[in-house]
Image: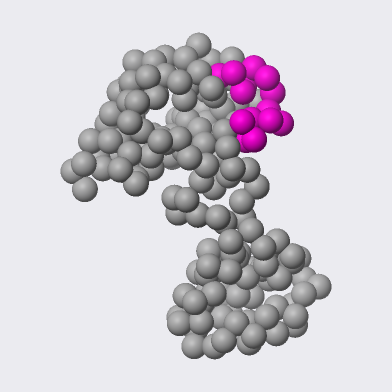
Amino acid sequence: MPGDSGDRTRYWPAIEAKHGEPMEHWFAAMQAVSGRPYAEQIAYLREDCGFSQAHANALVMYSRGSTTSRRVGTVDEYLAGADPTAAGTVRAILRAVLAAYPDLAVVIAWNQPMVMAGGHYVFGVSVSAKHILIAPWGRGVLDQFCPRLTGYTVNTKTIRIPVDWDVDPQLLKDMVGAAIDRVARG
């Protein structure tokens, strides 16, 4: 959610409406499974109570003392613990995207940098220990660029690039442009 504080309690009204019980009921249910591992607590809520993954995660994490899902609020905070080479590459990627599309906004969503156009995500980037993942958003956008991605590992929704990638501004411009076009078409 753009501009979302990450507050897990934002899910409470939807949980109460969907499952017909006040949150006190669900807090008591979590007390009954409090000693179990995370995965078992999630499975209990999903399988036995009919929760969605998002609602189950919000309740489990809240019950474990995590009141917010937000860990970072800026790109600099996100990159603070990253390898300096990877951080430089991510900054260069975002600069290239914004140079091509200066009206786009860089936000933090799912605790990683994302690029938005008109309230819709069009591109994301994340750093791992040994690589960076870039993701043009939208069904079919990644497939459209597969012929240009020879030599890269292309996953279902992401492209794996090296941490010292020689940024390809034209590729980034074209991918983000295709994602923006997808948003415009609805």
State which quarter of the image contains the N terminus: bottom left
* Quadrant in the picture for residue 140: top left
Q: Residue furthest right?
A: 35
- Image point 77% across, 71% down: which residue? 36
- Image point 36% across, 33% down: which residue? 104
Q: How many marks?
A: 0
- Image point 24% across, 40% down: which residue? 182
In this rendering, position of residue 63 left or right of residue 144: right
In this rendering, position of residue 96 left or right of residue 58: left
Where residue 82 appears, as percent x and y from the top left, is: 68, 28
Residue 24 belongs to magenta span: no
Q: Residue furthest left?
A: 185
Query: Would you place residue 54 above or below residue 91 in this image?
Result: below
Where residue 31 appears, as percent x and y from the top left, is: 75, 80
Q: Nearer the viewer, residue 43 or 72?
A: 72
Query: Would you place residue 39 above or below residue 162 in this image?
Result: below
Q: Nearer the viewer, residue 134 or 81?
A: 81
* Quadrant in the picture for residue 96: top left
Query: Would you place residue 30 above or below residue 161 in this image?
Result: below
Q: Is residue 175 visible?
A: no
Where residue 146 appears, as percent x and y from the top left, is: 35, 26
- Image point 59% across, 15% down: which residue? 164
Q: Which residues are magenta?
A: 76-89
Colouring used for the render: one colour
Q: Is residue 73 visible?
A: yes
Instruction: Characterize the magenta stretch by its predominant secondary structure.
Output: helix
Where residue 134 appears, as percent x and y from the top left, is: 47, 30
Query: Would you place residue 99 above or below residue 60 in this image?
Result: above
